[in-house]
Amino acid sequence: MKKPASSSSNREILQNLSGRLEYRMTNAYLFVAVLQENHETLCSLIAALLHIKREDILSIEILNPITLGQAIFLKDCVLDLLILLNDNTKINLEMQVANEHNWDNRSVYYLASKLTDLPTGADYNELKPVIQIGILDFNYPSDNQEFYQKIMLINKKTGKVFSDKAAIHVLCLSQIHNATPEDQESGLYKWAQIFKATTWKELIDLADNNPVIEDTIVTIAKLSADERIRQQCERREKFERDRISAINYGISVGRAKGRTEGQNKLLELITLMTQAGETDLIPKLAQDKALLTQMYKKYNL
């Protein structure tokens, strides 16, 4: 991870930034690249998400780093960061822009998969706490009015926490206006503004002489200027556009058929085809029943 640049060097770079952002921080590839490249950005964001002080982060390690600029296979559609905090707590951090209408189930699945990697023969007391954190660029569920949700296992009758080993946190960018004073104080509100920014001016105004945010913006600028990174950001945006189109198409076809079961099956097929890069065949499914049957068979549905 890079060390923060000097303040004078930062300001010189910031002065030359203007216009719209070609890639926002909601681009999953850029999101991962910036946090992997900039140690202080990662620490500051994690501290804000957990509502803890930066100095409480004694150590932080990314367990699944990517090689920056190297292609990510589109079938591996989840671009996340698995982080080990203070050698004890695992955090799975993900930026999600496409509403696939299954975020609750996906969160539980991701959480469970990280909880169940206890080595064979290890004592259950060695289980590390796991927090699944999703940063969503859409509202989920549709009636949600919370900016930041924290979900834990609790006793419904007493309200007492059953275990602190598992938690799901959800940051909903569309509900930024509902940020609490705690969210403001922790810095989470400002990070959400950074994610939502669409111009360099918006980002620079958010820095407000904050050296960590200044350096974050410089990291975004440098990575955005790297042709290898730009190519991967563009591939990611195209993938997300295709996936959203495919999901919307599946929903409309499913509604037209009027069968929830059929709609769910079709949505699952479209998701699998999108992950496999077969998006060009998706529009043909409604007109070609033989192709639809073939695809169901191919994907064991």
Image (cartoon, rainbow, N blue to C red):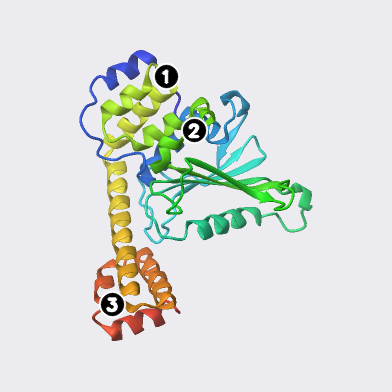
Q: Please, which residue is most extreme toward the left here?
A: 19
Q: Toward the viewer: 179 or 1?
A: 179
Q: Are marks 1 and 3 in contact (CB under 8 Å)?
A: no
What x and y, as percent, mark residue 122?
77, 53
Point 64% across, 48% down: residue: 152
Compared to residue 96, the image places residue 289 above or below, namely below
Q: Earlier in the sequence, mark 1 or mark 3?
A: 1
Q: Residue at x 28, y 17 (%)?
A: 12
- Which element carries disc 1, helix, strand or loop? loop
Whole-Å distance between the Cαs marked 1 and 3? Answer: 52 Å
Q: Which residue is mark 3?
A: 285
Q: How many marks?
A: 3
Say which element carries label 2: helix
Quick one: which residue is furthest to the top in this view? 8
| Residue 11 locus on image (x, y percent) | 31, 17
What amino acid is found at the position of numbered circle 3 in the picture?
Answer: Leu
Instruction: Say which residue label 2 marks.
Output: 45
> Can you identify the residue that label 1 sits on?
210
Which residue type carries mark 2? Leu
Marks 2/3: CA distance? 43 Å
Please indicate whether residue 286 sits to the left or right of residue 136 in the image. Answer: left
Residue at 73% across, 52% down? 157
> Does label 2 or label 1 sit earlier along the sequence?
2
Where disc 3 sits, the SS reads loop
State which quarter of the image contains the C terminus. Answer: bottom left
Name the mark on residue 272.
Answer: none
Residue 72 horizontal/vertical position (percent): 38, 53
Residue 35 place in picture, x, y as percent: 45, 36
Q: Relative to 196, is 102 above or below?
A: below
